[in-house]
Structure formats: C-alpha cells, structure tokens
Image: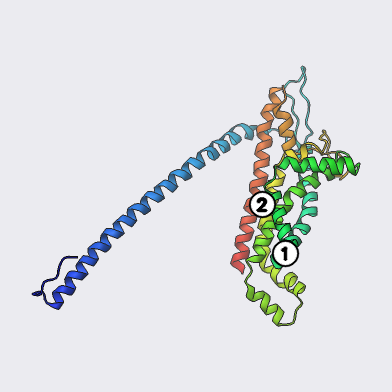
Amino acid sequence: MSDITELDTPAEVGHQMREEIRQISVRVRARRQLRSRIMVTLCAVALAITAVPLVLLMYQLFRRGLPVVLHAGFFTQLPQTPSLIAPNATGGVSNAILGSLVLTVYAAIMAIPVGVLAGVYLAESDSKLAAVLRVVAQTMAGAPSILMGLFAFAFVVRALHVGFSAIAGSFALAVLMLPVIVISSEIAVRGVPSTLREAGLALGAKPHMVSLKIVLPAAVTGIVTGIILAISRAIGETAPVLLVIGGGYINSWKPLNPVSALPLLIFEDAKSEWPSLRTEVWGIALVLVAFVFVLSLSARIWASRKQQAR
C-alpha cells in the first residue's frame, strides 16, 4: 500500500485503502480463475485421452460383433466346428451363455452370504482376528486371478475328486468375488451413522440384532453395489475357469457336469485356425460387454433410487 500523508483525511484514507484492497482482490481472483481454467482444460484433455481407446474399442465391438450377434441361431444353437465342406460354420453360443449364468449364480450363492457377514464382522469388531482378516481380504483382492483357478484345480478338482465341473468353476469365481464383497460390505457398514447403532442399543436391542435389523438395512445400498461389481468382475474372468470347468459343446446347468463360458469360448475361438471362429469372437465379446454393462447400470439405477427413497 502507498504511504498515507498527514494531510489526508480519515475518509480519504479509508477510501484509498478500500480501493487498494479491491485491486488486490481483483488480481487474486484473476489468477485463481486462470488456474481454474487451466486445470479444467487439463482434466478435459485427460478425459478425452481416456475416452478415445474406449470409444474405439466400442466402435470395433459394434462394427464387427453386431453382424455376428444378429446371425440367426447365435443365442439358441450350440457351437459347430468348421470343416473343409463348411468352413464358415460356427453355430451359436447357447452353451457358453448358459454356462456363464450357471457359474455366476452358483458363485454368488457361495460368496454373497460369507462376504457380507465377514464385512459386517470387520466393521463391527476391533479384534486382532478382524485386523488379520482385513489384511487377508485386501491381499486377495489384489492377487492375480489365475491363482484362484489353480487353487480350485488343486482343492476341488484334485483333492475332492470332483473333476472338471461347474461347481469347481463357481468355487474359483466365488473366491475371486469374496474379497470384493467383504471390502465393499465393510465400507458400507462403516458408513452407517453411529447414532443408529446407539439408538438401537438404547432401546434395549442386543448388538447382533442391531447389526442385522438396523445397520444392514441402512447399508444395503453400498452392499448391493459391491456385490454387483464383484459379479461384473467375475463374469468376465477367463483365468479362474480355464483350468476347472472342462468346456464342451453341451447345454448343462448341473453342478457336477462340465460347462462352457463366454470368456473360455473367446479364448478357444481366438486361437482357432478357422477365420469364421475368429470372427465369432467379436460377437461373443459384445454379448459379454452387454452383460457387464447391464449389471453395472442396474446397480447404479437401483442404488440411486434407493438413496432417493431414503
């Protein structure tokens, strides 16, 4: 600020100080707006760079996969092996679609109850066992998915003599889903306000009843979202089921029978020497992406409506 002389009146001094403060505020605001515009521009550029591969991938999926999906019998027929007489024969993928649904349903039945209860325990307990289980869950969440397939092969296929079957693949996917469900359930339960627990305990309810009747309903949105994310991850995994489900060109939903799956069929067709099977990969990939997209979108819509209702 400029020096204030003795000849200046108090009114002039106050006006001069306000004017200098206003000028400083204008300069500071201009610098902040400039930095804000720069950061928004950088974020927009980063978003565009991130979106370009996704847009190109989706374009290729629809351009190459849509004609395959629209082919008659793609969803209802069994796969066919091309031959010299019929080199373009591919059939359908009904066995892989049914197998993926069967594997996902069985895996969800195994993983969801255990994962949700473990998440509630980790959120409600501060014991050493809870700390160990939390570290184990976080470690499993970052482990390569092929380890789940190797574990299922050694434990279910070999040790229990179950053989290549849907239940072995479901077990591998359940182990893959479990840490995701545990971590998301713990986060959802910890997000419930403590006042709800205190109100339930103040009314005389036992701690386990408070957890089941008050805490879980309040955290159900986050828990279900985590479950859907775990299912979306499991349904597209190839490595865990590659070693244990057996494959085969049959429609089967029985737990002890070999089954196929969409990721496994993509793996098998992609390395085929027949161009028709390699072309079919795009259609299978489009169906798989559509499944995951529908699951994720349904979870977000449900969570949004549940949050609005609350």
Horizontal side of residue 181 vs 160, given as left or right: left
Horizontal side of residue 264 vs 196, given as left or right: right
Q: Which residue is mark 1?
A: 120
Could you tell me which secondary element the residue under label 2 belongs to? helix
Q: What x and y, as percent, mark residue 266?
A: 71, 33
Q: Quadrant of residue 137?
A: bottom right
In front here: 83 or 223? 223
Q: Is residue 227 visible?
A: no
Name the residue located 50 percent from the left edge and 39 percent from the top edge.
52
Between circles 1 and 2, the one closer to the viewer is 1
Q: Quadrant of residue 184?
A: bottom right
Name the residue located 63 percent from the left edge and 34 percent from the top edge.
65
Q: Residues within 10 Å of mark 2 (few under 14, many from 20)?
A: some
The amino acid on which the numbered mark 2 sits, given as a three-letter code, is Leu
View extreme (left): residue: 7
Q: Residues within 10 Å of mark 1 (few under 14, many from 20)?
A: many
Q: Which residue is mark 2?
A: 229
